[in-house]
Image (tube, helix red, strand yellow):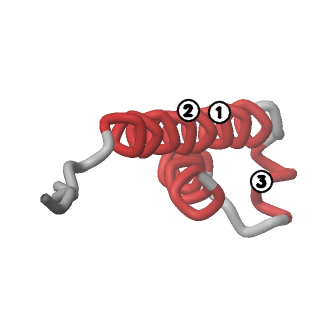
Amino acid sequence: MSATTINVPSQGGRLGHIIAKLRRAFEARKIERNTYIDLARLSDHELNDIGIYRGDIARIAREAGRMRG
């Protein structure tokens, strides 16, 4: 009599993947939030010096979160 091996997707692997994805999402959100706060603290003159309009801050913060998160 021979042994038969059945491959079943690991619940631990799936859970690990979900946890890693959540960690990346939280990190991206943290970067987005910090970027927004940092840029919002700048004066209009300082923003102009770096080529950013105040209305661009939310978009730039979202992009920063996507790029580094």
Position above or below: 6 against 10: below
Q: Which residue is mark 1?
A: 30
- Do the numbered discs 1 and 2 sit on residues whose CB atoms are within 8 Å? yes
Disc tally is: 3
Q: Residues within 10 Å of mark 1 (few under 14, many from 20)?
A: some
> In the picture, residue 23 is in which quadrant?
top right
Q: Amino acid at mark 1?
A: Lys
Query: Looking at the image, is mark 3 or mark 1 nearer the viewer?
Result: 1
Position above or below: 57 against 68: above
> In the picture, residue 24 is in which quadrant?
top right
Chain-order first, disc 3 or disc 2: 2
Q: Residues within 10 Å of mark 3 (few under 14, many from 20)?
A: some
Quadrant of the rendering where the N terminus is positioned: bottom left
Q: Which residue is mark 2?
A: 26
Of 29 and 52, the residue lying toward us = 29
- What is the C-alpha distance between the residues marked 3 and 2? 27 Å
Of 69 and 35, the residue lying toward us = 69
Question: Relative to 62, is 5 on the left or the right?
Answer: left
Q: Amino acid at mark 2?
A: Phe
- What is the C-alpha distance between the residues marked 1 and 2? 6 Å
Q: Amino acid at mark 3?
A: Leu
Under circle 2, the secondary element is: helix
> In the picture, residue 15 is in which quadrant?
top left
Under circle 1, the secondary element is: helix
Disc assigned to residue 47: 3
Q: Residues within 10 Å of mark 2 (few under 14, many from 20)?
A: some
Question: Relative to 14, is 25 on the left or the right?
Answer: right
At x 82%, y 39%, the residue is 42
At x 51%, y 57%, the residue is 66
Query: Looking at the image, is mark 1 or mark 2 nearer the viewer?
Result: 2
Horizontal and vertical percent position of residue 18: 39, 38
